[in-house]
Amino acid sequence: KTDFINFISDQEWKSIKPVSSWFGPSSFLMSSMSALFQLSMWIRHCHGYLTEHVGIPVWGSYAVFVLATLFSGLILGLVSEALETGWLF
């Protein structure tokens, strides 16, 4: 507490560089990091649900996530290629 009071009263805060806009809490980079963290927590929740409530073994839960990753990559690749070649529009 005393260090903080001294920091303010001695005006040491003036010597600190401001945070770059890239690393600010409302920047695109930090919002993306937050979204990835929320996704990882959702995946962890799903893994717990599959193993504890549904009764799927741990390796089966991992297999479900591997297949979901491969399938979503396939779909995103097909959509990307379709948009690039003008097939959809």
Image: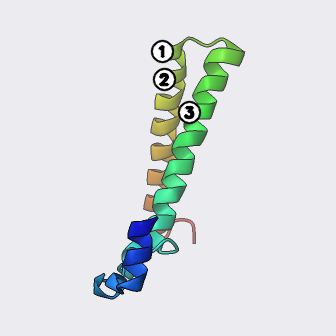
Quadrant of the image for the C terminus?
bottom right
Along the line of sight, the residue nearer the viewer: 9 or 68: 9
Residue in the picture at 35% in, 85% down: 10
Residue 76 at x, y percent in the picture: 49, 52
Q: Are marks 2 and 1 in contact (CB under 8 Å)?
A: yes
* Left or right of residue 55: residue 80: left
Residue in the picture at 49% in, 22% down: 63
Q: Could you tell me which secondary element the residue under label 3 belongs to?
A: helix
- Give the colour scheme shown: rainbow
Q: Could you tell me which secondary element the residue under label 2 belongs to?
A: helix
Determine which residue is flagged by label 1: 59
Residue in the picture at 66% in, 11% down: 55
Determine which residue is flagged by label 2: 62
- Within the image, what quadrant is residue 16 found in? bottom left
The amino acid sitting under disc 3 is Arg
Location of residue 72 with respect to 51 vertically, above or below: below
The amino acid sitting under disc 1 is Trp
The residues bearing labels 2 and 3 have C-alpha atoms spaced at a distance of: 11 Å
* Left or right of residue 52: residue 3: left
Location of residue 18 with respect to 46 vertically, above or below: below
The amino acid sitting under disc 2 is Tyr
The residues bearing labels 2 and 1 have C-alpha atoms spaced at a distance of: 5 Å
Along the line of sight, the residue nearer the viewer: 1 or 23: 1
Residue 27 at x, y percent in the picture: 47, 75
Total residue callouts: 3
| Chain-order first, disc 2 or disc 3 | 3
Q: Are marks 2 and 3 in contact (CB under 8 Å)?
A: no
Residue in the picture at 64% in, 21% down: 50
In the rendered image, is residue 85 in sight?
no
Q: Could you tell me which secondary element the residue under label 1 belongs to?
A: helix
Determine which residue is flagged by label 3: 44
